[in-house]
Amino acid sequence: MSGAPFEPRALLAGSRLGVLATLRSDGRPQLSPVMPFYDRDADVLYVSMTEGRAKTANLRRDPRAALEVTSPDGRAWATAEGTAVLTGPGVDPRGPEVEALVDYYRRAAGEHPDWDEYRAVMVADRRVLMSMAVDHVYGEMLG
């Protein structure tokens, strides 16, 4: 390494696999592997999830969440904490809930080969978009 200071937000921005922590009704953490997208300019994390899953139900009850990512070699990690907002699921493939998922996909992965198919799947799968404004970030690079 060049000796540059470790930037947890840079690790968040470069990671496409993380672990989302939500709170169960009894207060215990519930952990889910997810594929996050971090908008560094807006300081917001996005995750697409399915209605009816534990993480979605937990966030509807208590929107506090944390997301941790690690570097590919496991020698650095970053955790972002914040309050989640859920959008969806949508019932109209052209409705605002599905358009939010289209925007998320474009920003995270680029253009989809068949947007009509993508929109239909988002409705059929009851997909929900989590947006989490990042309140606090911390992490470490291990020596």
Image (cartoon, rainbow, N blue to C red):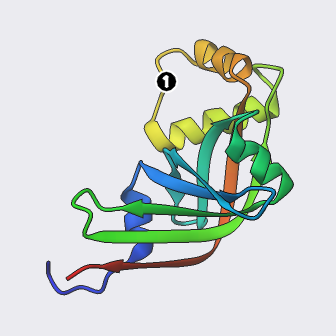
Tell me what residue is drawn at x 70 percent, y 36 percent.
53
What residue type is disc 1 on? His
Q: Is residue 92 above or below residue 102?
A: above
Tell me what residue is drawn at x 29 percent, y 78 percent.
141
Classify the position of the C terminus by image quarter. Answer: bottom left
Image spot of residue 65 (x, y percent):
67, 63
Image spot of residue 119 (x, y percent):
66, 20
Q: Which residue is mark 1?
A: 112
Q: Nearer the viewer, residue 13 or 53?
A: 53
Tell me what residue is drawn at x 74 percent, y 56 percent.
24
Classify the position of the N terminus by image quarter. Answer: bottom left
* Residue 73, quarter of the rendered image: bottom left
Image spot of residue 35 (x, y percent):
49, 44
Question: Which type of secondary structure does the marked residue at label 1 adopt?
Answer: loop
* Residue 14, quarter of the rendered image: bottom left
* Residue 9, quarter of the rendered image: bottom left
Image spot of residue 122 (x, y percent):
67, 23
Q: Nearer the viewer, residue 79 or 119?
A: 79
Tell me what residue is drawn at x 55 percent, y 36 percent.
105
Q: Residues within 10 Å of mark 1 (few under 14, many from 20)?
A: few
Left or right of 123: which side holds 134?
Answer: left
Left or right of 78: which side holds 83?
Answer: right
Left or right of 58: which side holds 22?
Answer: left
